[in-house]
Amino acid sequence: MEYIRGTTEFQITEPVVLSLGKFDGLHMGHQLLMEEMHKKRHLGYKTAVFTFDIPPRELVEGEPGSVLTTSREKEYVFSRNGVDYLIEYPFTQKMRSMEPEDFLKMLLEKTRMSWVVAGRDFHFGHNRRGDYRLLKNAGPKLGFQVCIVEKRQYQGRDISSTCIREQIQKGDILLANRLLGYEYFVLDEVVHGRKLGRTLGIPTVNQVPPPRKLLPPFGVYVSRVVLEGKSYGGITNVGRKPTIAGENPVGVETHIFDFTGDLYGREIEVQFLQYLRPEHKFESVEALTAEMQKNIQEGRRIFKEYKRRKL
């Protein structure tokens, strides 16, 4: 996959079927768009996704918002879904004020856009004046075809990034994963921590995701760790480690079952499977260690059941 980001100067010369959207988290609703795009591949088209480097609402409202997928994670999920081009276009004031028709012409100047695939709720251009009706009317005039995809629903509500963010913020990881179609995850580099876990006989790996990455409520979760194509069970603490003295940044700390090795500086994927307990301050490190051992036993049991369900 070619990942185009941080520039407005690019050119795709191959004919493409292009999907447009915010694409924060490639959830079950987005999968309908991906399916329609891949149906066109046998006609000789490459697949391309056009999105923005920040959520448009962030520039409009002036406040940073949380995201389900960081730029690196977005690259990861689209690559494994077989997309040929991912365009993460800078969302500038100029882009914000661009009329819908001019936006489409800009896309045609930079790509050989033969098809556009979008959801019925997609809006674009200045003041969100562009919608699926405008797309369908503009297609014949500008020389591209349009496929509009209906929303996928769960229990009467549209599946959306907003809905999934709500579930994660509430701590309902199981429902969030069901709506995503995969386990919510953090993909980031392993950094040095205080190495306390190693001294306690429970070694852990630490990740500090970007501030904009939406994390589930502070607490302990059963997790699945993916490293270079291999997967391991684990338990993961999200939070500030209140039992440990000093300033601790918000992080993701994982004990990986049955794994030994040095992971510092390497990128790992930590998937959240199930919530175990809230994070809280223990009276002593010994009390924390005893609780962690209980969590490990419970985590092993749950992960074993998770693997059985996946067979």
Image: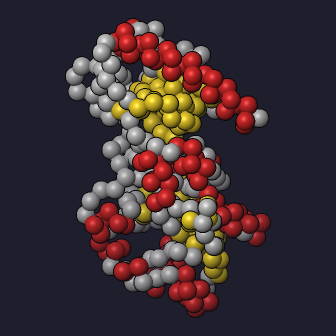
Residue 205, image x and y in percent? 44, 23
Q: How many marks?
A: 0
Asked if residue 297 is positioned above or below residue 72 in the image, the reply reads: above
Tell me what residue is drawn at x 44 percent, y 17 percent.
291
Please state if 23 lies on the left or on the right of 238 as rendered: right
Q: In the picture, which quadrant includes the C terminus?
A: top right
Could one spot residue 122 in this view of the protein? yes
Tell me what residue is drawn at x 47 percent, y 64 percent.
22
Asked if residue 278 is positioned above or below residue 6 in the image, the reply reads: above
Please state if 279 lies on the left or on the right of 184 as rendered: left
Tell me what residue is drawn at x 65 percent, y 81 percent.
145
Please state if 311 lies on the left or on the right of 142 as rendered: right
Q: How is the image coloured?
A: secondary structure
Tell me what residue is drawn at x 73 percent, y 36 percent.
309
Tell which of 188 and 180 is nearer to you: 180
Residue 276, image x and y in percent? 50, 30
Residue 64, image x and y in percent? 30, 56
The quarter holding residue 227 reads top right
Tell which of 280 and 91 is nearer to you: 280
Could one spot residue 84 in this view of the protein? no
Residue 20, image x and y in percent? 53, 69
Tell which of 219 and 271 is nearer to you: 219
Looking at the image, the residue that sits furthest to the left is 246
Asked if residue 209 is positioned above or below residue 293 in the image, the reply reads: below
